[in-house]
């Protein structure tokens, strides 16, 4: 067989499927930031990337200390560029955790955890305690609190008790996921809105009378399917399988078709970073630009996390 007659392995074994608009093989390489971003080095701490676009470990600072405005500004730049930041060997208590979170904005008062997660002692600290009695159920890709008119800007998660094996948390870069969508699908979703609600998630864990009491204060809300981050201009996918109910203004069939494709896209491993928890580990993520998934592979071992979220703003979409 001549060289010219040698079959191309990709054509032979991985022929593109024309019926699957998301079919892709080979490099899936997205930009970490926008093309106009000022990609400067970090001067006030050390930063180690964990993947090409999402996730970085920061060392050389103590979160329990009196961090200067300059350090905070550099952390914020790192958060915008890397979406989720990891801090190891941080011996901090709940008061330190709260003090650090308060440097980034108002602390979110979660209205549902006292009904669905037993043992809550503070409205602004959600304790996620899982063991042989209460199994972990957060193993679905999601942004937090998108059922709210003003979803969380960010969240800071502290490992209180971690299992010896398992219990990792994963994050996915929804900006990279948007950038690498097929052009026609990006155009199709550019100005769409989606409805978000808590009724089929938190609502299922509450008595009917509690749902009825809370419903007037927390009705369904709509957000753009493609969200634009004000500080950077970055476009990100802003739908998730936990809280998004439907695409507004299209048929149920088309809504389901679009959402299935977008959920598949954000689950690509090329867009993900995975954290193996150790004692005294902190994760700080931008809830606008990434989704997360808590691996529920450690049952019946015990895993306890404290999460504090920072109040966000109303999502904006692409200008008409």
Image (spheres, grey):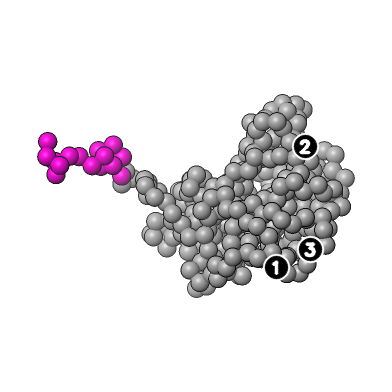
**Dot 3: element:** loop
Image coordinates of residue 99 in percent, x first then y, are: 83, 58
Give the mark, 1 or 3, whose residue is nearer the N terminus: 3
Image coordinates of residue 208 in percent, x first then y, are: 77, 41
How packed mark 2 is, by other alpha carbons closer than 10 Å (few <14, some 14-19, many 20 or more), is some
Who's the residue at 85% across and 48% down the image? 93
In this view, the residue farthest toward the left is 2
Q: Is residue 7 magenta?
A: yes
Q: Answer left or right for 183 relative to 162.
A: left
Who's the residue at 69% across and 64% down the image? 44
Give the residues drawn in magenta, as a range: 1-16
Who's the residue at 69% across and 28% down the image? 299
Location of the N terminus (image quadrant): top left
According to the picture, the residue beneath numbered tag 3 turns out to be: 67
According to the picture, the residue beneath numbered tag 2 turns out to be: 161
Q: Answer left or right for 226 relative to 1.
A: right
**Dot 1: element:** helix
Q: Give the CA distance from mark 2 to mark 3.
A: 26 Å
Q: Are marks 2 and 3 in contact (CB under 8 Å)?
A: no
Who's the residue at 46% across and 57% down the image? 30
Give the mark, 1 or 2, whose residue is nearer the N terminus: 1
Q: Quadrant of residue 195?
A: bottom right
Give the label on residue 149, or none.
none
Q: Are marks 1 and 3 in contact (CB under 8 Å)?
A: no
118 or 77, which lies in front?
Answer: 77
According to the picture, the residue beneath numbered tag 1 turns out to be: 73
Residue 13 visible in this rendered orientation of the protein: yes
Image coordinates of residue 295 in percent, x first then y, are: 63, 37
């Amino acid at each position: 067989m001549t060289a010219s007659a040698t079959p191309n392995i990709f054509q032979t074994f991985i022929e593109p499927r024309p019926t699957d608009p998301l079919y892709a093989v080979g490099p899936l390489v997205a930009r970490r930031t926008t093309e106009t971003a000022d990609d400067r080095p970090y001067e006030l701490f050390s930063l180690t990337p964990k993947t090409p676009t999402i996730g970085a470990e920061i060392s050389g600072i103590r979160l329990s200390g009196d961090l200067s405005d300059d350090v905070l500004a550099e952390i914020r730049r790192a958060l915008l560029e890397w979406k989720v930041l990891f801090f190891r060997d941080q011996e901090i208590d709940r008061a330190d955790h709260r003090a650090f979170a308060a440097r980034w904005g108002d602390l979110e008062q979660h209205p549902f955890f006292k009904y669905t997660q037993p043992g809550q002692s503070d409205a602004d600290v959600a304790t996620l305690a899982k063991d042989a009695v209460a199994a972990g159920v957060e193993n679905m890709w999601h942004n937090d609190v998108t059922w709210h008119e003003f979803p969380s800007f960010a969240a800071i998660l502290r490992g209180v008790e971690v299992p010896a094996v398992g219990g990792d948390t994963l994050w996915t870069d929804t900006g990279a996921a948007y950038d690498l969508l097929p052009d026609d699908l990006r155009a199709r979703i550019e100005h769409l809105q989606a409805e978000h609600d808590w009724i089929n998630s938190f609502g299922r864990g509450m008595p009917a009378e509690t749902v009825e009491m809370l419903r007037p204060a927390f009705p369904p809300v709509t957000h753009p399917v493609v969200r634009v981050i004000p500080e950077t201009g970055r476009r990100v996918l802003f739908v998730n399988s936990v809280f998004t109910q439907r695409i507004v203004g299209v048929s149920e069939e088309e809504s389901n078709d679009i959402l299935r494709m977008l959920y598949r896209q954000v689950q690509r491993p090329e867009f993900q970073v995975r954290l193996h928890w150790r004692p005294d580990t902190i994760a700080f993520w931008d809830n606008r630009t990434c989704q997360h998934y808590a691996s529920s592979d450690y049952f019946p071992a015990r895993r306890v996390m404290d999460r504090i979220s920072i109040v966000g703003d109303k999502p904006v979409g692409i200008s008409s």
